[in-house]
Every structure is written in C-alpha cells, then in structure tokens.
Image: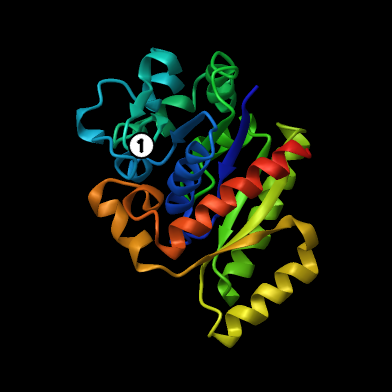
Amino acid sequence: MAKIFCVANQKGGVGKTTTTVNLAAGLAKVGQRVLVVDLDPQGNATMGSGIDKRTLELTVYDVLLESSSVAEAKQHSEKAGYDVLGANRELAGAEVELVSQERRERRLKTALSAVKDDYDFVLIDCPPSLSMLTLNGLCCAHGVVVPMQCEYFALEGLSDLVNTIKQVHANLNPDLQIIGLLRVMFDPRITLQNQVSDQLKSHFGDKVFDTVIPRNVRLAEAPSYGLPGVVFDPSSKGAQSFVEFAREMVRRVGSM
C-alpha cells in the first residue's frame, strides 16, 4: 500500500517542487513505484516532470471535482520514470468551487484510495499557502516532508507549519506527522547555515534527515529542460544527494 507524503512549507521559495520531483525521480531510480500529485496551480511539478501542463485534458482539478478518477487523469513521465497527476491554472478555480461542496477537504483522499495499491510512494507538491488545496493534501497524507533552507526566517516559517500540522492532526487526520526536515540549498561555508542546522538537530533530533542537499547549479537548471535534476545530470552533487535521500526515505518508511 502506498505511503502518501506531502512536501510542504508555508514559506515560499524553499525548493518544495525541486524536492518533490527529484525525490520522485530518486525513488524511481531505486526501484519504487511513484505518483507525483501537483496541487499547485502554477503546475511547476508537472512541467518539471517533462509533461506539458498546457496540453493536459484531465488534471487534479477534475479529480477534486469528482469528474475524473486518478487512473484516468494521471500521465506517465517516460523520462523521469514516475506517474504524474498534473495541474495547470484551472486548479486555482477549485478553491472557490470546493467551498460549497460536501467532504471538500477529503476529495483527494477518496480519489487516491482507489490507486493505493498501484504505488509505493505518493508525493504531493503543496502550494505555499494554507489553502483548501493544501488541506486536501494534508488530510490524505501519512506524513509531511519539510524542505527548508538553514536561515533565520526559515525557522519562523517552520513554527507556523508545525502549528498547522498539529491542528490538522487534531481535527482531520490523526495519522499526520512530520516525517522529517530536509536541509536544502545548503552551503557549509556559511556560518549561519551551520548554526541553524545545529539548532534544527538539537531541537528536532532524528526528525532531521541525515541527507543534506547542497546548493547546486545543475538542480536549478534542470526545470528549464523539463526534467528533474536526478535525470538531467545524474553525476551532479545535487542529483546524487537526492538519490541518497530517496534511499533514506525508503529506510525510514520501512521502520515506520
């Protein structure tokens, strides 16, 4: 049965989409069956997986409004090696349309239950705001992977996210927990980053993943080619770090 994880952080620009598509590609490389769900109307995870969001006939929008199933709407990314439930600008309208609907925060959970045996991992790329879309992701997830930069404002954003997760855990999804914090765009030469990293480890202990993703130009270039960095340049330090992170995720899920 699939383990469902949201990749979330209420601070923007921390590399959520980069983490989602590269973790998915890394998991595919180590033999896991993966579905990426793009819950961001910008559709960056869709494009970054090699799928053109402008040509999609069915998207996660149709799944949330129950006019399509996941099996009908998903696309397979040949280059990246995993399936994608894509998104485009239409998804922004789902916010308004879901407000009056029954079970509005559980639509995605219901849809994914039909394909839970087809995958080992489902990774959900959430928008930065706490919206109805993010709530749908958190309601169906077993846990949250939090990518974060080791800088002061990131710690403030983290406390907001922890409070959100506690509220969802208490009211909507008792299974929800933080699986781990992933340090991304890390530069060991910067003293502040090392200090924040040490603070994270002392406060969150084993919730901080061992793997650290370095600041890497090839990871930044990859989306313009419509590929995860793991596929775009497998020999780069960033790609190798994400494959190692995928292995760590498999080990951590095995011990859950």
Which residue corresponds to mark 1? 92
Quarter location, residue 239: bottom left
Q: Is 251 drawn above or below residue 67 in the view shown? A: below
Residue 68 point in image, percent of width and height = 39, 13
Where the N terminus falls, by quadrant? Answer: top right
Left or right: where does residue 109 sit relative to residue 200?
Answer: left
| Residue at x 38% of width, y 22% of height | 74
| Residue at x 73% of width, y 74% of height | 199
Q: Amino acid at mark 1?
A: Ala
Quarter location, residue 112: top right
Q: Is 113 drawn above or below residue 92 in the view shown? A: above
Q: How is the image coloured?
A: rainbow
Give the farthest residue toward the front.
Answer: 235
Residue 210 point in image, percent of width and height = 68, 61
| Residue at x 79% of width, y 62% of height | 205
Q: Is 163 drawn above or below residue 121 in the view shown? A: below
For label 1, the crowd category at 10 Å Cα-Cα, with few meaning under 14, some 14 to 19 and many 20 or more, is some
Left or right: where does residue 175 sit relative to residue 111?
Answer: right
Q: Is 2 drawn above or below residue 9 in the view shown? A: above
| Residue at x 79% of width, y 71% of height | 202
Q: Helix or strand or loop: what does disc 1 sit on?
A: helix
Between residues 39 and 231, which one lies in front from this camera angle? Answer: 231
Residue 183 point in image, percent of width and height = 59, 64
Left or right: where does residue 169 sit relative to residue 2?
Answer: right
Quarter location, residue 136: top right
Between residues 106 and 86, which one lies in front from this camera angle? Answer: 86
Residue 43 point in image, percent of width and height = 33, 41
Where the C terminus falls, by quadrant? Answer: top right
